[in-house]
Every structure is written in structure tokens, then in C-alpha cells.
Image: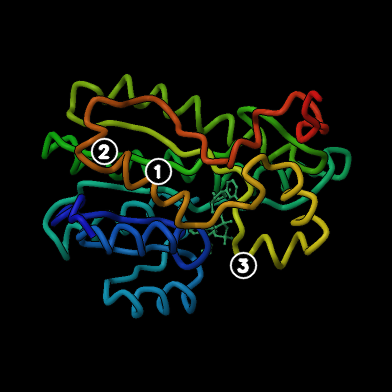
Amino acid sequence: MTNRLKDKVALIVGSARGIGKGIALRFAEEGAKLVLADNEVEAGQATAVELGVPFIRTDISRMSDAEAAVTTALKHHGRLDIIVQNAGIYPWQLIENTTSDDWDSVMAVNLRGTFNAARAALVPMKAQHFGRMLFTSSITGPHVTSPGHGHYSASKAGINGFIRAAALEFSGYGITVNGVEPGNILTEAIELHRGAAYIKNMEDSIPLGRLGSPRDVANAFLFLASDDASYITGTTIVVDGGQLLPEGNDFRLLPP
Ligand SMILES: NC(=O)c1ccc[n+]([C@@H]2O[C@H](COP(=O)([O-])OP(=O)(O)OC[C@H]3O[C@@H](n4cnc5c(N)ncnc54)[C@H](O)[C@@H]3O)[C@@H](O)[C@H]2O)c1
């Protein structure tokens, strides 16, 4: 622990489990004052109790919930330095089987949730002339994709566009806006929904030979939230174990 976020107030949306919980644990280690938000009450409260921090039930697709989460952070700590909007859903569904409602439900959380978080956090961050807005994007969408990720890919590519636009608009307010693009990260959700065969296949396609951990992703968020990143805005960091690098499947074959 090096106190890189000492006394910084951070609201982490989508922090009940998985990557978001990893970010919360990492930020807590570095001295941040946390407020956790998630739409899953039981898991969210359990994580908050583990860390001894406040929790607010938040459906980030609703602007009123985003505003209430920001208000909770202000009520507890008097300011808001960092917001991480990590909540995201990734149903696996071919485009030909996707209805308009399916499409809208992914966009509502992943993309509108991103806008809602930024819009709600903007008010105190602009007033205090300081803020770090951070978003969980993905390599899926901005760089690569696979069958069944049409709506998800569109939402994550959209997040990157929003990061650039918000970074530019908020640059005069002392607010930086950045994101992290995880590759394949081993979370409870991935284990549950994708299974062992998927995970083995992914391990084989990742040059560093393993899936990432929530802590791997959290370390990139920590850097972007810290003073070390004060001159960085409008960009994303890829955390993928080199998965984007190979030109083909035979990347472990070396010349004689
Ligand atoms: N796991 C991966 O390999 C991977 C890779 C790239 C990007 N991501 C992104 O990372 C983020 C976290 O993924 P994860 O694998 O930890 O998933 P997860 O399902 O374990 O965690 C997502 C969290 O967001 C919460 N959430 C969902 N909908 C919400 C809503 N409407 N309002 C508030 N909270 C909500 C969930 O309750 C959960 O706690 C997502 O944005 C996902 O798209 C994950």
C-alpha cells in the first residue's frame, strides 16, 4: 500500500462482484474513501460490509439512480473525486436472434449507464474543478469481436467514443475522462456463463498464457485515478495479456 488515492472519494458503480469488486478492493488498499453502487443488493451489501463502506442500490440505466448514488457519496464524504462506471451486461446472442428489446436492454446499462454516470458526476466535479471519470470498456467492440456479441460490441465501441467526447468537453473543468479495455478476465460471471472449454480456449489464445484477474484490471484503473495520470485524458488502456497482438492462431510457432 502506497496511499496513491489517500483521502480521494471514489464512487464505484457495478462493484458487487467481479472486476468492480476488484477495483473497490484495490482502491481501498490505496487509501480511497469508497461508496459502492450496484443493482444487486445482497452481493453489493456483502462487498460493502467486507470493506466497511457505504452501499447504495443503483440501477445505472436510470438517471435518477445515478444521481442518487452521487448524492450518497457527497452526503458521506462532502465531495466526489473519482467515479468508475463498471456496470455492464454481456448476454450471448446472435444478431439474428436479437430483438429490439434485447438490443435496448444492453444499451441501457452499458451505454446509457455510462452517460448517466458521467452526467451525474459532472455536477460536483465541475463545481470542485477536479474529477476523474473512468469507464470499463472492452477489447470486444473497439478491436475484436466474436459471434453473439453484436449489441455488446456496439455498446463498448460506443463507450470509447463517449470517453473522447466527454474528455474534450470537460477538459476546461479539471476533469479527465478515461477507460480500461479488459481482455478476458476470470470472474465468477465468466466461469458461470462461459464454462471450462471457453476458458481453456481463451488461455491458448492469450500470449501471456492466462486469463486476467480483476486485480490486473484494477491496477490500470488505479493508475488512471491517481495523480500519475493527471495529464492523460480521452484514452483507454488495454489490459489483455497480449491477446490483441497475434496475426493468427499459430503465434507460438517460432522460426527454426
Ligand atoms: N470479465 C471479462 O472478461 C470482461 C472483459 C471485458 C470487459 N468486461 C466488462 O467489465 C465489467 C464488469 O464485468 P464482470 O466480468 O466483472 O461482470 P459481473 O457480472 O461479475 O459484474 C458486473 C457488475 O455490474 C452489476 N450490474 C449489472 N447491471 C447493473 C445495473 N443496471 N446497474 C448497476 N449495476 C449493475 C452487476 O450486479 C455486477 O455486480 C462489465 O462492464 C463488462 O462488460 C468484462
Find disc 1 in the rendering and name its residue: 220
- Asked if ligand 1 lies within 8 A of label 3, the reply is yes
Q: Are marks 2 and 3 in contact (CB under 8 Å)?
A: no
Q: Is residue 180 left or right of residue 195?
A: left
Give the vertical position of 209 relative to 236 (above or below). below
Near mark 2 (Cα within 10 A), the count class, few <14, some 14-19 or many ≥20, is many
What amino acid type should be assigned to the residue bearing mark 2?
A: Leu
Q: CA distance from mark 3 to mark 1?
A: 20 Å
Give the vertical position of 161 relative to 133 (above or below). above
Circle 3: element type:
helix
Give the residue at x 72% y 53%. 91
Q: CA distance from mark 1 to mark 2?
A: 22 Å
Give the residue at x 58% y 42%. 241
Q: Position of residue 190 (x, y in %)?
A: 67, 60
Q: Which circle marks residue 122 in the picture?
A: 2
In the foreground, 231 or 248: 248
Find disc 3 in the rendering and name its residue: 188
Circle 2: element type:
helix
User: Quick check: can you spot residue 111?
Assistant: no
In the foreground, 131 or 197: 197
Q: CA distance from mark 2 to mark 3?
A: 32 Å
State which image quarter holds ligand 1.
Answer: bottom right
Q: Quadrant of residue 255?
A: top right
Q: Quadrant of residue 256?
A: top right
